[in-house]
Image (cartoon, helix red, strand yellow):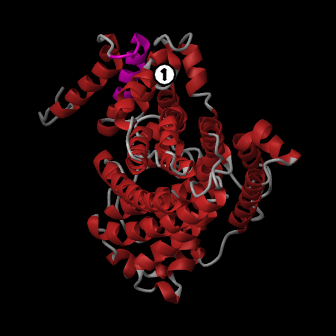
């Protein structure tokens, strides 16, 4: 095909190569001879997962995700394509992401981001100090996320940071976005992993207690992880800004008056959205803190976070805006095509990668027994420090390949017996393993926050995203190896 001027139109050769590699993994790899204990079904799931991640890294998100749903349905792990669609598109994380995107995104769409940027950047303490501004921004939410729900707060913070960047005239693919978004996901994961007292982290803590016979000391873990969090965050902000050559000139010289007069005050509509959204956020905090109360049990087990924020969204679409325009706080037609509120790449990435990553550890794939065979020679007969360091590294690597929840659940029964055999303080091993499991960020299927992070349009290059996250994880790994090794040596 050629244009009117005779110029050939079509894909560059590299794109055909990427498509061919994607198709090979998604369609052909599964028919190769299995290795070790991996089953034919495991080969199909493994190839499908690798193909999807490769496509996300080199091509796009939507069509590989749709193809993944079809191929997952005929993989032999589920009954049919309808079953696959139900498991993937009907996944609770997908529904939760949709309703939370709309509610949190509307806060920014209706002016909160510009107001927040004006109020914070105009404070005298931050004049000419973009590093201090960023550190304070991240530090506050690191501690807040001990009790907050990660996905809605991450969506909101990313939208706010994007608004700050656009207001300061930063362009798409600028290091400012990679470094800033990387800091947001890092700080939120640091906060939620300080002590495993709720959600799936609590499940891992209970699994560890059942396998090892010793529960996690939440207080001791909180002290260690709190110190590590401050050190990791500070190092990321200061050293990361230099390493990724973040240009702060736009932010340092930014004139808040460029945001316009409408940024001086919050609109009535925005105030109502913020109040209602924060109310539901407080309900999630209560449910995550007082887990044994009847109300919390109902919220966590019956209504769930997805249902809670669905009610939040419905209220925002019913409650009057307060601006005398005869409209509700959120007008669906105004947010349905706005990426700050509804990002289809995020939705499809969550739908495809999270179930696939979890499927990797299912019994029918044979991948977990293969991992056991691989890891046993590494841990058998080793010293306590060696097992601790090897467990941290193994958990960080594997939890960034598959689902962090599924991987950690599979590895705890493998590692615990070797740790017990050393006679060392078994609780320290549990803290380190569970703390590592929270950092599934490198690949989109590692965790729900990872899928949201990788799908942001402001950071389109996979290579840059991975470099930023690898730097963050390296800091996390070094800090916990040092702290937990010292703890193990001191406590025996």
- Does residue 49 belong to the magenta stretch? yes
Tag 1's secondary structure?
A: helix
The picture places residue 306, in percent across and down from the top left corner, at 69, 41
Instruction: Identify which residue is drawn at 55% across, 14% down.
Output: 78
Instruction: Identify which residue is drawn at 25% across, 25% down.
Output: 21
Residue farthest along the right direction in this orientation: 294
Report the magenta residues as a range. Answer: 36-51
Using the rendered view, name the quadrant where residue 471 is placed. Answer: bottom left
Q: Which residue is mark 1?
A: 69
- Does residue 20 belong to the magenta stretch? no
Q: Main secondary structure of the magenta part?
A: helix
Query: As rendered, which of 197 and 175 lies closer to the eye?
Result: 197
Instruction: Identify which residue is drawn at 49% across, 10% down.
Output: 76
Vertical comparison of 442 with 363: above or below = below
The picture places residue 367, in percent across and down from the top left corner, at 42, 22
The picture places residue 395, in percent across and down from the top left corner, at 44, 42
Q: Residues within 10 Å of mark 1 (few under 14, many from 20)?
A: many
Query: As rendered, which of 14 and 424 lies closer to the eye?
Result: 424
Vertical comparison of 73 with 138: above or below = above
| Left-right relation of 224 to 100 | left
């Amino acid at each position: 095909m050629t244009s009117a001027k005779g110029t050939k139109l079509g894909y560059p050769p590299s794109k055909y190569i990427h498509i061919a590699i994607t198709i090979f993994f998604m369609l052909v790899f599964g028919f190769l001879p299995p290795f070790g204990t991996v089953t034919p079904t495991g080969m199909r799931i493994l190839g499908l997962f690798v193909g999807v991640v490769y496509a996300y890294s080199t091509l796009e998100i939507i069509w590989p995700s749709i193809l993944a749903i079809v191929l997952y349905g005929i993989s032999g792990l589920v009954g049919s394509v309808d079953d696959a669609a139900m498991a993937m598109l009907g996944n609770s994380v997908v529904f939760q992401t949709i309703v939370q995107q709309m509610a949190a995104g509307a806060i920014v769409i209706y002016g909160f981001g510009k107001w927040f940027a004006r109020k914070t950047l105009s404070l005298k303490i931050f004049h000419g100090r973009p590093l201090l501004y960023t550190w304070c921004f991240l530090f506050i939410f690191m501690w807040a996320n001990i009790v907050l729900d990660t996905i809605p707060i991450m969506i909101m913070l990313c939208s706010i940071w994007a608004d700050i960047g656009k207001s300061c005239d930063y362009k798409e693919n600028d290091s400012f976005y990679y470094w800033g978004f990387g800091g947001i996901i890092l700080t939120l994961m640091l906060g939620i992993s300080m002590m495993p007292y709720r959600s799936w982290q609590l499940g891992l803590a209970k699994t560890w207690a059942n396998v090892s016979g010793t529960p996690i000391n939440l207080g001791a873990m909180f002290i260690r992880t709190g110190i590590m969090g401050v050190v990791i965050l500070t190092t990321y902000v200061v050293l990361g800004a230099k390493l990724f050559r973040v240009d702060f000139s736009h932010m340092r010289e930014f004139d808040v008056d460029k945001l316009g007069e409408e940024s001086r005050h919050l609109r009535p509509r925005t105030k109502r959205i913020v109040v209602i959204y924060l109310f539901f956020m407080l309900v999630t905090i209560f449910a995550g803190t007082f887990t044994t109360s009847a109300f919390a049990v109902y919220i966590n087990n019956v209504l769930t976070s997805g249902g809670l924020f669905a009610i939040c969204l419905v209220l925002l679409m019913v409650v009057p805006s307060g601006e005398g325009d005869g409209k509700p706080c959120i007008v669906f037609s105004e947010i349905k095509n706005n990426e700050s509120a509804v990002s289809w790449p995020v939705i499809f990435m969550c739908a495809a990668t999270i179930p696939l990553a979890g499927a990797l550890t299912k019994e029918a794939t044979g991948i977990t027994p293969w991992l056991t065979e691989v890891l046993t020679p590494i841990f058998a007969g080793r010293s306590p420090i060696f097992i601790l360091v090897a467990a941290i590294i193994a958990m960080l690597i594997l939890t960034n390949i598959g689902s962090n929840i599924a991987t950690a659940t599979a590895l705890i029964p493998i590692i615990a017996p070797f740790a017990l055999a050393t006679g060392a303080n078994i609780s320290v091993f549990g803290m380190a393993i569970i703390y590592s499991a929270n950092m599934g960020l490198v690949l989109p299927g590692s965790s729900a926050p990872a899928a949201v992070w990788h799908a942001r349009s402001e950071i389109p290059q996979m290579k840059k995203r991975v470099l930023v996250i690898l730097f963050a994880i390296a800091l996390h790994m070094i800090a916990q190896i040092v702290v937990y090794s010292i703890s193990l040596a001191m406590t025996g």
